[in-house]
Image (cartoon, rainbow, N blue to C red):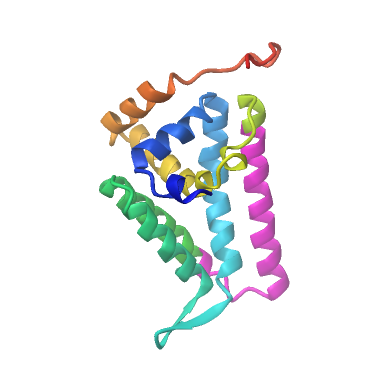
Amino acid sequence: MSRQTFLRPAFDLLVRHARYHRDQRNLTTHLIGVPMVVFATAVLLSRATLQLGGVRTTLAWAAFAALWLWTLSRGQFLLGLATTLFTAALAWAAHGLTGLAPTAWLTLGLGLFVVGWVAQSVGHYYEGRRPAFADDLAGVLVAPMFVVLELLAMAGLCRPLMARIEQAAGPTTLRDLAQPLAR
């Protein structure tokens, strides 16, 4: 990921992400797959402990803290806060699984990670495009924010922001799978 892309405002990042996600089936699979991958990542990082300035924490909390700082600094504070709360809830729930037997913990973490990526891959099949992160790793960081925005818009919140993003990215569609992609 280029430093320039990494530092873009949330609106620009969300528009770029939205352009890769215009098929309604792809959007639906991401509503399932992205939280699953975020949760699985937290599960897999939850057992690794570290000392940071005399405070004992896990690699999951450290990694997610970096994500939260980045999300909150992109210029859409309320969306960043909602994304932080959403991903913090997933990370907190994941830490509740650290007491599982190592094999069960690893199987659950890896299994959810793989199933989440498969769900998103199915969505990109419908989209007819490879995942956004294949072109720019910023898509991995933007995906949770994008999903939270979608959920908020479904609840009647953040609609002006969603409307601006959709105006810039174009309308959602249902791609006809029988037709070749226009390049």
Q: Which picture quadrant has residue 107?
A: bottom right
Nearer to us in this view, 142 or 120: 142
Residue at x 43% of width, y 24% of height: 169
Tell me residue 135's x, y (percent): 59, 39
Q: Is 175 located above or below residue 66 in the figure?
A: above
Q: Is 164 located above or below residue 57 in the figure?
A: above
Tell me residue 97's x, y (percent): 57, 69
Q: Is 173 located above or below residue 94 in the figure?
A: above
Nearer to us in this view, 123 or 165: 165
Nearer to us in this view, 13 or 59: 13
The answer to whether residue 92 is left or right of residue 165 is: right
Q: Which picture quadrant has residue 64?
A: bottom left
**Magenta stretch: residue 101 in it?**
yes
The answer to whether residue 40 is left or right of residue 17 is: right
Tell me residue 26's x, y (percent): 57, 30
Q: Which residues are magenta?
A: 94-123
**Magenta stretch: residue 107 in it?**
yes
The answer to whether residue 121 is left or right of residue 32 is: right
Tell me residue 84's x, y (percent): 37, 56
Residue at x 65% of width, y 25% of height: 128
The answer to whether residue 31 is left or right of residue 158 is: right
Residue at x 64% of width, y 40% of height: 119
Q: Main secondary structure of the magenta part?
A: helix
Q: Quadrant of the C terminus?
A: top right
